[in-house]
Amino acid sequence: MREGVTCILGKTVKWKRLGSESNQTLVLLHGLGRNMNQWNPVAEALSEHFDVFLFDLPGYGGSQDFEPTEINITFPIWMMDRLFEKIGISNIIVAGESFGGLLALEYALKRPENVSKLVLMDSAGLGREICLNYRLTTLPAIGEAFISENIKHPGVEGIPLTTVPLLRILGNVIRFGISKLFRRSISVSREEDNNLKLLRYGVGLFGQKTSIRRDGKLKNIKTPTLIFHALDDAIFPSSQALRAYRCLPNAWGNSPVFFKQGGHFPLESENEEIAVRNVKTFVNTLVEFAYA
């Protein structure tokens, strides 16, 4: 494994690379609130078949924070251009999960000459629908309250609607509301703050905004595309994966590859049996797709 920190567009970006550089390059993009270690369950296995390249998106992990003017979909594409050029990779397979799926999708739209194949897993940007939790999180004070409560439930998609969490949320809404009224700052963690900024850019009370929706542009993607989706994903409904599959001119397989269990990121489950099964399905299917 090789790893390093590179300066791109005035920002330090942390990256790592696994496998033989003589193999096809596979770029893995992580989701919102995560970092490249999200892919640890599959990175080693994939490195037996690919030159695997991972990096922390700005604002996450070991990479430097983004500026307010960089909260958009265009900046990450420019950054990826410079990073790939500096590292020396091209003609890539690009795969992304959730927010990373949106970036992979956008990169394939903007840089089709550099993408040989596209892989989307429980991707954002495929429709308006998104869970109520995320929509409410975009509201002032309520968003900060939800973010504060979310960290008490790691691995849970959505806040359990029981008395104690609801009372804590109500208390946090009042606390953050008062702080905004009197212009006092209440600190949240770096990644919580960045999550809110990006979420509010792309999501509103009525769902995913046009600023990040790419479902209307899927017909323009000629790149062979593989879609993974968890049937029990509580954030994005599986109907989005089906609609995307039908719209893509070159979707691979007879349908999206659905995981029966595992949640929004099905490669990482509290149930070890489910996680092992999903990891095996993901790796084997991706390898078959890449070398088909």
Image (cartoon, rainbow, N blue to C red):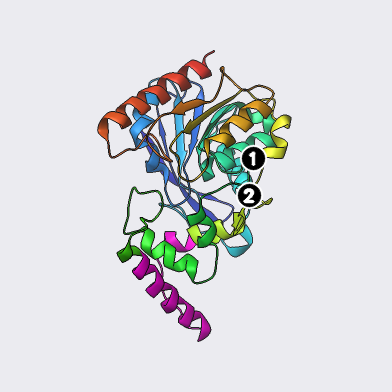
User: With respect to residue 221, does 200 lie above or below?
Assistant: below
User: With respect to residue 68, does 53 lie above or below?
Assistant: above
In the image, residue 290 lies at what x, y percent?
A: 52, 19
Instruction: Please indicate whether residue 243 sits to the left or right of residue 28 in the image.
Output: right
Instruction: Please indicate whether residue 267 sits to the left or right of residue 115 in the image.
Output: left
Residue 110 visible to an observer of this rendering: no
Amino acid identity at mark 1:
Glu
Whole-angstrom CA distance, mark 2 to mark 1, is 8 Å
In the image, residue 75 lies at what x, y percent?
A: 63, 51
Of 198 and 26, the residue lying toward us: 198
Query: Do residues under tags 2 and 1 come within 8 Å of each other at their CB atoms?
Result: yes
Residue 261 visible to an observer of this rendering: yes
What residue do we see at 59% from left, 30% from top? Answer: 242
Residue extending farthest left: 272
In the image, residue 132 lies at what x, y percent?
A: 51, 54
What residue do we see at 37% from left, 42% from top? Answer: 37
- In the rendered structure, which segment of residues is drawn in magenta? 166-194
SS category of the residue bearing label 1: helix
Of 249 and 41, the residue lying toward us: 249
Instruction: Please indicate whether residue 201 sits to the left or right of residue 162 in the image.
Output: right
Instruction: Please indicate whether residue 68 sits to the left or right of residue 45 in the image.
Output: right
Q: On the image, which quarter does residue 253 sit in? A: top right
Instruction: Give the main secondary structure, helix, strand or loop, of the magenta stretch.
Output: helix
Amino acid identity at mark 2:
Ile
Question: Quarter of the image containing the C terminus?
Answer: top right
Among the two numbered marks 2 and 1 on one chain, the one whose residue lies closer to the N terminus? 2
SS category of the residue bearing label 2: loop
Residue, disc 1 = 106
Q: Which mark is residue 73?
A: 2
Q: Residues within 10 Å of mark 2 (few under 14, many from 20)?
A: some
